[in-house]
Amino acid sequence: MPIVDSHCHVALSWYEPVESLLRQMDANGVEKAILIQMMGQYDNEYQRACARRYAERLASVVLVDVERADCADQLEREADRGAVGVRLRPTTRSRGDDPLAIWRVAVRRNLSVSCGGTGADFASPSFAQLVSEFPGLKIVIEHLGSVNRPDDDRNLVTRRRVFGLARYSNVYIKFHGLGEFAPRAMPVTEPFPFAQPIPRTLRMAYEAFGADRMMWGSDYPPVAGREGYRNALHLPLSELADLTDDERALAFGGVAMTVFPV
């Protein structure tokens, strides 16, 4: 099955250049990847150049400065230059008369939204209202909705609300390896480096969204500070071994290709 990495970062000033990502992809049989602009970087030129240079393998999800009055125009230009999506927060609102202007541009230009934020932001009624207002806009919740751990009562309530967004057919969810929600075993064990039993977070996401609305992403290169690229791919594959071949093909590549076409 073709594997697509739906969430990775490249840069010259922070993280790693694109060649480092491509080496990881090649070493692990990852066919394509979606470049997600890092927070705070509004200059998308390097990422755009990477996607253009490796057009058969990479696509670009950009960031624009929503504090600027012309942010909608910025996003229009990025769409003209080939962006397949935009990264927004659940709380992102435009300046001016229309606070949802930037979201409307995404709808008009057929840009999917990769959405990063806190669990509380995702669980808020205002975000659910926004999602319902744009039923044709594909919105992808990053990092399992940031409700990974610990499993205290308050976090479980927030997680139920975040995963409850699956009731909207235009909402998807990303998972980024077991290291985001499973504590590392101490001492580290081989070949499975996490303390047992691991939390059911990934399984709960599958039960809520189904394989046809979830997508794997490595979170490279921050994942190097957790279990590393290879384990971030192969251990979730093992955890979801009971899915059908078609379901695994969707969760590890097919859905990403539909939402962020390369």
Image (cartoon, rainbow, N blue to C red):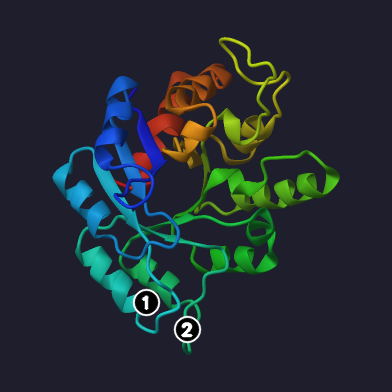
Q: Which mark is residue 71?
A: 1
For the question of whether residue 29 can be seen, the reply is: yes
Q: Nearer the viewer, residue 128 or 86?
A: 86
Depth order, front residue of 238/50: 50
- Amino acid type of disc 1? Cys
Q: Earlier in the sequence, mark 2 or mark 1?
A: 1
User: Helix or strand or loop: what does disc 2 sit on?
Assistant: loop
Identify the residue at image location x=29%, y=34%.
20
Q: Quadrant of the C terminus?
A: top left
Which residue lies at the image location 71% right of the left edge and 47% below the top edge? 159
Asked whether residue 136 appears in the rendered view, the answer is no
Q: Residue furthest front?
A: 13
Q: Which residue is mark 2?
A: 95
- Where is residue 11 drawn, in percent x and y? 31, 49
Contact check, label 2 and label 1, Cβ < 8 Å = yes
Eyeballing the image, is 44 above or below 211?
below
Count the marks.
2
Q: Which kind of residue does numbered mark 2 sit on? A: Arg
Q: Residue at x 30, y 55 (%)?
A: 84
Residue furthest left as drawn: 53
